Structures are given as structure tokens and as C-alpha cells.
Amino acid sequence: MGLYPPPARLPVSIFSRLPDKFRHKVPTAWADANRGGNAVDSFLEGPSFDRASNLYVTDIPFGRIFRISPDGMWTLVTEYDGWPTVSRFTGMAASSSPTTSGGSCCSTRTAAR
């Protein structure tokens, strides 16, 4: 018996999901090392928000950083060789891992949620 009542159950719903155009279920070196060689289409982590309420996440196996707008639109901010593991903000630009330079963009593609 606890000192406090159990927390209230809150309803949940899916706000947004990685659009199919960004899903590529293929074997990767990251999946070999972390998922027993099973093909993955993404592994998102390192969430960070900017001042405009955009959410940034890193996709480790494919070296991608995505921006998710407050209305659920996904934009590929940058893509490079490597395994980004954390997002942070330097000023207003998103950056990830020591191999990027202040969040400079290599390509930008947007998809509906």
C-alpha cells in the first residue's frame, strides 16, 4: 500500500508518425551491431524542441535528422554518413554529433504526417 493514490489514466493518441516515404527497411551496419542484423526502417531518438515548437529527432541507422512541425509535418533536415545519437541546439540551428557543423542542411524534403 502506497502513501499516494495511483496516477490517473490519461487518454493517448498518435500525434504523428514517420511517413512511409522516409521508411527504408533494409539491413544496415547499425542494425547488425544493435538489432542482431534485423533490417530496420528507422530508430528515432534524441528529441529536442526549438523556440518555434518544432521537434527534432535523430534517426541513427540512416544518419538523418528530422524536424516535426507543430502540425505534424516531417522534414528531413540533414542526412550524412554516421550514426547521430543526440540533438542539441546552437542558437536556432539544430545540430547532432560532432560531425555536423551547426545544423547546416544537406537536403530538405517534407512529407505529410
Image: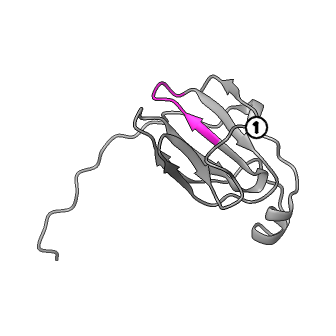
Q: Residue at x 67, y 50 (%)?
A: 101
x and y percentages locating residue 22 in the rendered image = 75, 36
Query: What's the image's color scheme?
Result: one colour
Q: Nearer the viewer, residue 53 or 31?
A: 53
* Relative to 54, 102 lies left or right: right
x and y percentages locating residue 34 in the rendered image = 75, 69
Q: Residue at x 58, y 59 (%)?
A: 86
Quarter location, residue 4? bottom left
Q: Is residue 68 magenta?
A: yes
Q: Is residue 82 above or below residue 22?
A: below
Residue corresponding to mark 1: 106
Q: Is residue 85 above or below residue 66?
A: below
Q: Nearer the viewer, residue 25 or 11?
A: 25
Locate the C terminus by quadrant: top right
Which residue appears farthest toward the left when viewing the image? 3
Q: Is residue 89 above or below residue 2?
A: above
Q: Amino acid at mark 1?
A: Cys
Locate the N terminus by quadrant: bottom left
